[in-house]
Structure formats: structure tokens, C-alpha cells
Image (cartoon, helix red, strand yellow):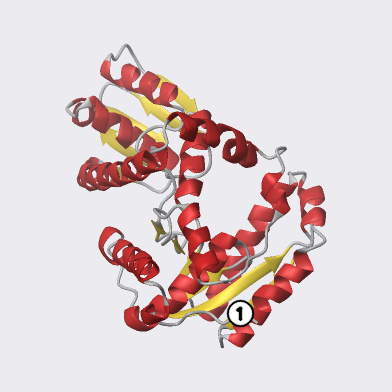
Amino acid sequence: MVKLPSKLKDLPAKYSHLCLRIKNFVSKELNLDLKGKKLLLAVSGGVDSLAMLCILNVLKSSMKFSISVCHLNHGLRPEANTEYNFVHSICEKNNILFFGGRSKVQVYSRTRKIGIEEAARNIRYKFLQGIRNKTCSDFIVTAHHLNDLAEDILMRLIRGVGWPSLGGMKARDDTGKILRPLLLISKSELKDFLQDIDIRWHEDMSNYDLKYKRNRVRHKLLPLILEENPNFLKTVANLWLLSRIDERYFSSVLKRLFTAAKKHENFIVVPRAKITSWEQSIRLRFYKSMISDYGKGQTLFSNLINLDRCIIHYSGPKTIQFPGNKIVEINKREIKFIL
């Protein structure tokens, strides 16, 4: 049976420092006080989530939060039941509340005509949110780490995502109630941590299946980049920090600019003269916020540039269609965003 460490003094000094780095990241970089919070940990039994469980079990007393664990068994692999029982037994041994579930992902995938990977992700998210609501937990906590962040940034670059979203996933998502406290910790650190405190984990062999894009990025593209630049993960961490700084700045600027908009039930109107007085970088972010934040549909940079040209170099009324049935109407006096 696995007995988890529960205090910093239970750990070698280097791993006490690792826990404190994560504590500082949450409290200072994410500006989050976890005192009195209930955290629901998504634990698969792999190295990442098991390390997260150990670290948060150590930090919960000093940061004064509580933890529970959830695990969803998709039943897609022969070892899935073993992993489910493994996580359940750890929680029983360490008096941690456990919530387990089993899905029919293949049926879900077939009936909705989507891939297994997408189906599993959708079901997992619904399961986690359902347990969070049931337990009144403040955050779902996932074990995404620095290598995951590097993969995410590369995949966003491949898709053509713009700045500052190119900086990668958020470590704190207040809308979805997701927390990623390990985001700037490398996978090698997590693996060394578990090995040195003699805790074993389960390997999910589907993580090596190259039919999935993320696995191709993980096992083919990222190793090539690390070969060219061994400090690439540090670069990724710096890029993430810079994107958060820029995101906070532009969010504060846009919040002030929204006062120029007149909101109606199905559309928002902004005087054209007001928009043309702004710098282009602000205009583009304003358009993206107006269009992307309301409903589905990815807004391409080229579409935003085209919209900006039509507004700045006005040559008569125009109507521009965006993905998700969103429309922008341009006339000499005002810009109407129909949502």
C-alpha cells in the first residue's frame, strides 16, 4: 500500500523546496489564497497526477485547504481497472475522499460521430464538473506540467493561434474552475520526486500511440527542439509568464474601452470614430474580444485584419460574416457587432 507524505519534513530538502515553489506559484503568480478551499484532484495513477497528489497532500495543512480525488475509468485499455483500483486504494490508505466513475466512451463517440480522443475529453470534463458541483469544490486540479505546456504552445503554433493565447493554457481558469499548480514544473522533476520517495506509478501506454497529434508532438517534435535547444522548457516558462503579463494589461485596457459600447439584447454598437481613435493593437484585440467571447467559432487573424481595414479605410457600408453566425455591420457612424 502507498503511504503518501503529509508534511514537508517527511521529504528530502530538495523536494521540500519543490513543494514551496508550487506554493509560491499559486499564492504569488496566480494570486490565489487556498485557505478554506476545497480542491478536487483529477488523478489517473500516472506519474504526473500521482506526484500532484503527493505534493498537495503535503501542502494542504500549511495552506489550509482540503483535497478529494476523482478518477474516471473509460475502460479502453486492459489495465484500466487496475489503475482505477490503484488510485482508490491510495485514497483509502490515506483517508482521502475518492470519487470514481466509469464511462461508455465508445458509445458516446459513435453516437456523436466524433473521435475517441475528443469523446473521452468531453466525458471526462463533464464528469469532473459534475463531481465538483456535487461536492461544492472550489477548483478541479489537474497535473499539467511544463512539458505539457510546451506541447500546448507548439500545438497552438501549428493551429495558428495569435498572441497572447500563444503563451499556452492558463494555470488558473476561474470560468471553468480549473487549477494547474504544476504548470511550470518539468516532468523530469516530478518523475525524480516519486522515484526518490519510492512511490510507483502506472504508465498509460496510449500516451505513446502516434496516431494522436499530441503524442506526435510529444515524442517526435518536442525532442527535436530540445536537442537543438536544451533550455527550451525554460524559454517556454518565460513565454508563458510574458503572455500572462500582456494578457493582464490588455484585459485592463479592454475593460475601460467596453464603456464605449452600447449593449442591446442581440447586438453591441460602438461609434466608428471611437474605434478609429485607438491604436491598431488595441483595435484588433477589441474585435477579437467582441467576436470570440460570444459563442463558438475561431476568429482568424486575417479576418480581424480585414475587418480593421474596412473600418479604418471606410468606403461604404459593409457586412462581414464570422464563424458561429456572428456578423459585423459597418457604416460611417457606427460598428454593430451582432452576436
Q: Residue at image x 39%, y 27%? A: 329
Residue 294: where, in percent of width, then height? 45, 45
Quarter of the image where one finds residue 268: top left
The residue under label 1 is which amino acid type?
Val
Q: Quadrant of the N terminus?
A: bottom right
Q: Quadrant of the C terminus?
A: top left
Left or right, residue 275 beside residue 309: left
Residue at the far left: name it.
277
Q: Which residue is mark 1?
A: 2
| Residue 290 seen in this snapshot | no
Q: Residue at image x 56%, y 84%? A: 96
Q: Residue at image x 79%, y 62%? A: 75
Q: How many marks?
A: 1
Q: Residues within 10 Å of mark 1 (few under 14, many from 20)?
A: some
Left or right, residue 167 beside residue 135: left
| Residue 84 seen in this snapshot | yes
Q: Residue at image x 72%, y 37%? A: 211
